[in-house]
Image: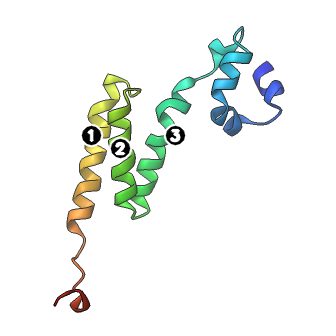
Amino acid sequence: MRIFEALSVGALPICDRIDFAIEELSDVALFVDTTVHRWRLADEAAICAYYLGRPEESLALNRRLLAEGHLPDEERPRVEGNLVFALDALAARPVEHRPDLVA
């Protein structure tokens, strides 16, 4: 509750300002879920991007998640699978014929 009161707003800004919470409120920061800031938001965004028909964005987010090193080992296979879904969605897109680009 002290973190909520110190930041004077709800959970979303707490996620955005997690570093502040950890530094300034270290005596209660044990109860702050740093995984939200480190990887969970990007994971949710990647899933949303896929279902919104934005596989490029999903692919980029999944690649970032796998590269940054914050993702727990038990989550890697799922995120790797999500990356494959994004690649498959990109491969399934029809290729647009652009006669204006052909000489």
Viewed as shown, does residue 8 lie left or right of 85?
right
Viewed as shown, does residue 69 lie left or right of 32?
left
Residue beneath label 1, please? 80
Cα–Cα span, label 1 and label 3: 16 Å
Helix, strand, or loop for circle 3? helix
Residue 54 figure quarter: bottom left
Q: Pick the quarter of the image with the C terminus.
A: bottom left
Dot label at residue 102: none
User: Is residue 1 among the parts visible in the rendering?
Assistant: no
| Residue at image point 56% right, 24% down | 34
Q: How many marks can you see?
A: 3
| Residue at image point 26% right, 63% down | 90
Viewed as shown, does residue 18 lie left or right of 78?
right
Density class for disc 1 (Cα within 10 Å; few <14, some 14-19, many ≥20) is some
Helix, strand, or loop for circle 2? helix
- The x and y percentages for residue 52 are 44, 62
- The x and y percentages for residue 68 are 38, 32
Density class for disc 3 (Cα within 10 Å; few <14, some 14-19, many ≥20) is few
Dot label at residue 62: 2
Q: Earlier in the sequence, mark 1 or mark 3?
A: 3
| Residue at image point 24% right, 81% down | 96
Q: Pick the quarter of the image with the N terminus.
A: top right
Cα–Cα span, label 3 and label 2: 11 Å
Q: Earlier in the sequence, mark 3 or mark 2?
A: 3
Q: In the figure, 68 relative to 57: above or below?
A: above
Mark 2 and mark 1 in contact? Answer it, CB < 8 Å. yes
Residue closest to the eye, 86 or 17: 17
Three-letter amino acid code at the position of disc 1: Glu
- The x and y percentages for residue 35 are 51, 27
Cα–Cα span, label 2 and label 1: 7 Å
Residue beneath label 3, please? 41
Three-letter amino acid code at the position of disc 3: Leu
